[in-house]
Image (cartoon, rainbow, N blue to C red):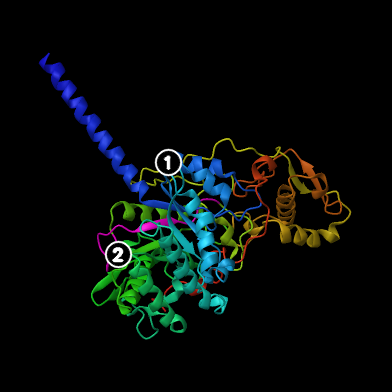
Amino acid sequence: MANLAALRRWLCFLAAMAAAASWSGVSRVEALGMNWGTQATHRLPPKIVVQMLRDNGIKKVKLFDADQDTLSALAATGIEVMVAIPNVLLDRMTDYDTAKEWVRRNVSRYNFDGGVTIKYVAVGNEPFLSSYNGTFDKVTFPALQNIQNALDEAGLGDTIKATVPLNADVYMSPNDKPVPSAGRWRADIADLMTQMVQFLSNHSAPFTVNIYPFISLYLNDNFPVDFAFFDGGATVTPVVDNGVTYTNVFDANFDTLVAALKGSGHGDLPIIVGEVGWPTDGDKHATNAYAQRFYSGLLRRLAANTGTPVRPNQYIEVYMFGLLDEDIKSVAPGNFERHWGILRYDGQPKYPMDLTGQGQNTMLVPAQSVEYLPKTWCVINTNSQNMDKLADNINFACTYADCTALGYGSSCGGMDSNGNASYAFNAFFQMKDQSDQSCDFQGLAVPTQTDPSTQTCNFTIQIATTSAGYGRLAAPLGVVAAAVLFLAQLTLLH
């Protein structure tokens, strides 16, 4: 009996340890958010996406609008939500009555027991990008003020804060002193940033910034690859700033922002990383392997609350970018823009990862109950007599469908001309819901039930219209993540 009692105590101890480990993992997942973009020809239904979030223990989500179907699907889930006002609406939000009405329709209406747990309102999306040439400079701050004041008037201001997700190009280090401690606001918006930071501080609201180490690597062939990751170690030539050593661009970028905030008298202002991630196609560095490496390092650091050299041992609220691939995002910054998802367009995981940061990588729980079109592809008709029209038809298909995977260094970039044509024709065919007339191309294409995919190049079968009939609009202005991202990163190594 004594042995049995000891065994029971030991089993209880093991159970307690397992429960503690499980709770520790869950708590770390709760500290992590996801960007849920919807710029796709065939969108997963919101209910399927929300269930997928829950299945993977994701407790925070950042949106790019305030879509009613999306918010309804998030009701009663306990998932914290950042809703957003697209840039095209910022001018309207400078009218206080309009701002109050927006808050009423998109925030207050969901504020009830069993409603949506809205925590933030994103006022615009990277509205101060240099590439916008000042389009939103005069309306963003008034819109921010009106939205926060409207939240306060509605009795929600203590729990829901307005913020402005900004690209990292709003701050920089000078060329003659390219170190984080020299960080300052971009000259053309310095006064504006100082006023906005003061307002955020007065209302206990966070500063939100989007940081993309991938872009540093994408735009500069001389950028050291390992400096874009968190595990470079001895292979990285560090940046030393007044005795502080930086071995990755994320830390250097973040601390440059902290320096700019200090310069405005608010060095302790909370910072949210609104977007950070790594794409998997559309460029030679946009691969599953690199994405997995980047997220593994990021998630380990978040789980350990490592912080950055200037803000060590601190929790950083981070929203990964992004959840799903989006096949109609603008490719102005690069073909990779449509491949940021940790999941494919249909909610299937691309590579193993561990959101708890413990390094125990497994495939995420995929989207369930996804309906697909029939297993039919559209490929080149090699017997066609119109081969002289092939280039024009490929160009036509790729004008309307997503062919970014065909680019140099991309997953489908190594095929011959017939393979390229088949990929383009199939992309258009799937985008058009496999309609008969969409697989002709002047006799150059034929449908087939034989999968033309290769070991490296996947020929998509799209989500069925019953799943996708949820909007087919072009990407709205202002929702594109970083129109000219080359201005987003520091000049630390120049």
Indicate whether 365 appears above or below 175.
above
- Dot 1 falls on a residue whose secondary structure is loop
Our reading of the magenta stretch's main secondary structure is: loop
**167 lies left or right of 14:** right
**Circle 1 is placed at which residue position?**
362
**Residue 203: x %, y % from top left:** 35, 66
Is 132 positioned to the left or the right of 360 in the image? right
Q: Which residues are magenta?
A: 307-324
* Figure label count: 2
Residue identified by numbered label 2: 308
User: In which quadrant is the C terminus drawn?
Assistant: bottom left
Q: Is residue 319 magenta?
A: yes
Say whether residue 273 is left or right of residue 331: left
Residue 182 occupies quadrant: bottom left
- For the point 83% across and 53% down, which residue is it? 441
The Cα–Cα distance between marks 2 and 1, rounded to whole angstroms, is 28 Å
Of residue 290 and residue 164, the one placed in the foreground of this image is 164
Give the quadrant of the N terminus.
top left
Give whichever of discs 2 and 1 has the lower sequence position.
Answer: 2
Q: Amino acid at mark 2?
A: Thr
Q: Is residue 30 visible in the rendered structure shown here?
A: yes
Rate crowding at label 1 as few (under 14), some (14 to 19) or many (20 or more) other CA atoms within 10 Å.
Answer: few
**Residue closest to the far left:** 2
Q: Amino acid at mark 1?
A: Thr
Give the residue displayed 27% in from the left and 34% down from the top: 18
Circle 2 SS class: loop
Rendering coords of residue 436 (x, y %) = 82, 44
